[in-house]
Image (cartoon, rainbow, N blue to C red):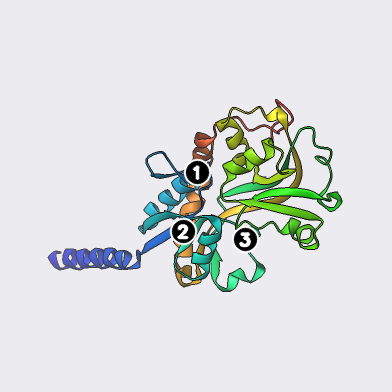
Amino acid sequence: MTACRLLYGCAVMAALWCSAGLAQSLTGGAAQWPPYSYQDGEGRATGIAVDVIRRVMAQSGNRLELVFHPARRLNLLLDEGRLDLNYADSPAWNADNATQRFVYSQPYLQVREYLYFLSDHPSRHLPIEHLRGLRIGMVRGYAYRSLDSALGSGRLEKLETSRDHALVELLVRRRVDAVAMVDEVFIDQLAARKLAPEGFTRGAQLSDAPLVIKLQRRHADQLPQLNAALQALVRSGEVERIRRSYLRAEPVTPGSATAKR
């Protein structure tokens, strides 16, 4: 009996040792992108995606350092392999050949991007292929495949800035005709400035993108446990609870006081 207990104890210790050996210290980067990822007034990382990745890493036993960079620099550091992952990315926002360098987790949220106009803009209801001579505000380093052709041909012009909150200011001051933003990010920015959604109109949809964790391909062995943790969080309703806890306003369609997405 003593020998059996000794063997069992050794097996348990070996399993724990192997688990500890599999755990890694990773650096996760993201842009300042409230309500998904941002730093609060005391410089602490917070947001929907931040809370999700922290829970995922806690379940997988990995240690995670969170860093913030402007979108363009963030993409450069990832391309150079100097960051291990982006915890708030999407295959829809990456080039097709990105899979040569990165792997993607299963989705944990779905986000939608649109053009947003002031409610009196004459082009607010036009499809992208009919938009001409307009200036579109967007965050520097962000890519919108549905706008590539129009921007490349000069049919549309872009004005880039470093942060989402600056885009709303540009739109209100009519320095741009429209801005490209995720729906909940736009509503969050309106709520932060106490601006009524009725003053704005949601125009053409740019994407319907699954939000994932993007990892360097060298960490592909981490995917099974990360996916298992994400699946558990989604199925339990925890991801949705986290999302709702960060919304500063009940989601509405700009231009309507009551219409829900």
Q: Are marks 2 and 1 in contact (CB under 8 Å)?
A: no
- Quarter of the image where one finds residue 203: top right
The N terminus lies in which quarter of the figure?
A: bottom left
Q: In this rendering, would 103 be left or right of 4?
A: right
Tag 1 or tag 2, which sits nearer the N-term?
Answer: 1
Q: Are marks 2 and 3 in contact (CB under 8 Å)?
A: no
Residue furthest to the left: 2
> Marks 2 and 1, how far apart in space?
17 Å
Dot 3 alpha-carbon crowd within 10 angstroms: few under 14, some 14 to 19, many 20 or more:
many
Judged by depth in the image, the label closer to the viewer, 2 or 1, is 1
Name the mark on residue 91: 3
The residue at the point 50 percent across, 34 percent down is 245
> Marks 2 and 3, how far apart in space?
17 Å
Tag 3 or tag 2, which sits nearer the N-term?
Answer: 3
Name the mark on residue 121: none
- Residue 194: x %, y % from top left: 59, 27
- Residue 127: x %, y % from top left: 83, 47
Residue highlighted by disc 2: 226
Name the amino acid, label 3. Answer: Pro
The residue at the point 50 percent across, 58 percent down is 86
Name the mark on residue 48: 1
Q: In this rendering, would 189 be left or right of 44?
A: right
